Amino acid sequence: MIFTVRLGEGMRAKSAAIFVDGNPEVSGARTGCRFEETTGVRTMFEQVHDYLGQLIPERPMVLREMEQYANEKSFPIVGPLVGRFLYQIVLMTKARRILELGSGFGYSAFWFSLAAGSKGHITLTDRDKSNKALAFDYFKRAGLQSQFVFKVGDALKLARRIDGPFDIVLNDIDKQQYPDSLDLAASKLKRGGLFITDNLIWSGKVCDKKRDDTTNAIIEFTEKLYQDTRFFTTIMPIRDGISISVRL
Ligand SMILES: C[S@@+](CC[C@H](N)C(=O)[O-])C[C@H]1O[C@@H](n2cnc3c(N)ncnc32)[C@H](O)[C@@H]1O
């Protein structure tokens, strides 16, 4: 039996077929997933995400505005399904010191701050200066209580000079730089701290046979992450795939 599913950020026009009965003869394929163009097909993955999306309770108006802004500008953000996951992780772990690599205009940091409240110290990084002003404007309007530091420049270079340890490092920079983020995260996290990385399913392109450099970098990173004895990793297949790795 084959379920056709469509994966990824903003539901790109790319789809995957998952062989749920593991019988390669059904399709002639031998791997766990394969991809095909299915324009116009509402896939299982889309339907599941729509279902999960409509379950999400109301969120603060400023978050809604940020989502609308991201939508209008085609700016990639983690979105509410993952945002709630970040919020929940802070509630579960009582994380206080959070470092973001690739903060955009502050949407993911907003979710962290909602959970950490006035005890949160959130360091944001982004190479685009204009995102800093935008983020602080949203934080101020929402009356967020956390302490925010927003550093502009290359996230990996900046982070090397920032003192840890952190409770959480969120990784959302250019995907080709993901392999370089691993040692940095390991060195900046406390034992038991969490390394969270977005976009590891990459619209399903990680299952394609023909891969571009970005997809290869994601796969290289993901394989290293799973093998790295400094971490214990699971990937959650919500939205575009988010990994959560505990620093051992
Ligand atoms: C996917 S967006 C981040 C979204 C944010 N985490 C959220 O969900 O609200 C990626 C951001 O990282 C920035 N970026 C990518 N690579 C970077 C790097 N090496 N150093 C600094 N910023 C980087 C981009 O400018 C962009 O704003």
Image: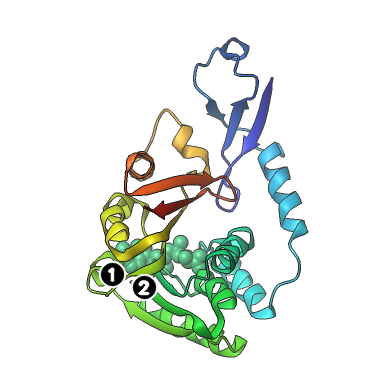
In the drawing, does residue 30 fall left or right of residue 5? left
Q: Which residue is drawn at 38% across and 41% down?
A: 226
Tell me the quarter of the picture where residue 215 sits. Answer: top left
Label 1, residues with CA under 10 Å away: few <14, some 14-19, many ≥20: many
Q: In this view, does 6 lie above or below 198?
A: above
Counting from the top left corner in percent of width and height, residue 151 is at: 33, 79
In the drawing, does residue 101 fall left or right of residue 119? left
Is the residue marked 2 within 8 Å of ligand 1, measured from its CB? yes
Give ligand 1's quarter of the image: bottom left
Q: What residue type is labelled 2?
A: Thr
Q: Which amino acid does label 1 sit on?
A: Ala
Counting from the top left corner in percent of width and height, residue 144 is at: 56, 85
> Which residue has dot 2 on it?
125
Disc 1 versus disc 2: distance between alpha carbons? 8 Å
Label 2, residues with CA under 10 Å away: few <14, some 14-19, many ≥20: many
Inspect this view and state whether residue 112 appears.
yes
Q: Which of marks 1 and 2 is in front?
A: 1
On residue 136, the disc is none
On residue 159, the disc is 1
Residue closest to the eye, 87 or 34 = 87
Q: Which residue is drawn at 60% across and 28% down?
A: 18
Q: Is residue 163 above or below residue 89?
A: below
> What element does badge 2 sit on?
strand
Is the residue marked 1 within 8 Å of ligand 1, measured from its CB? no
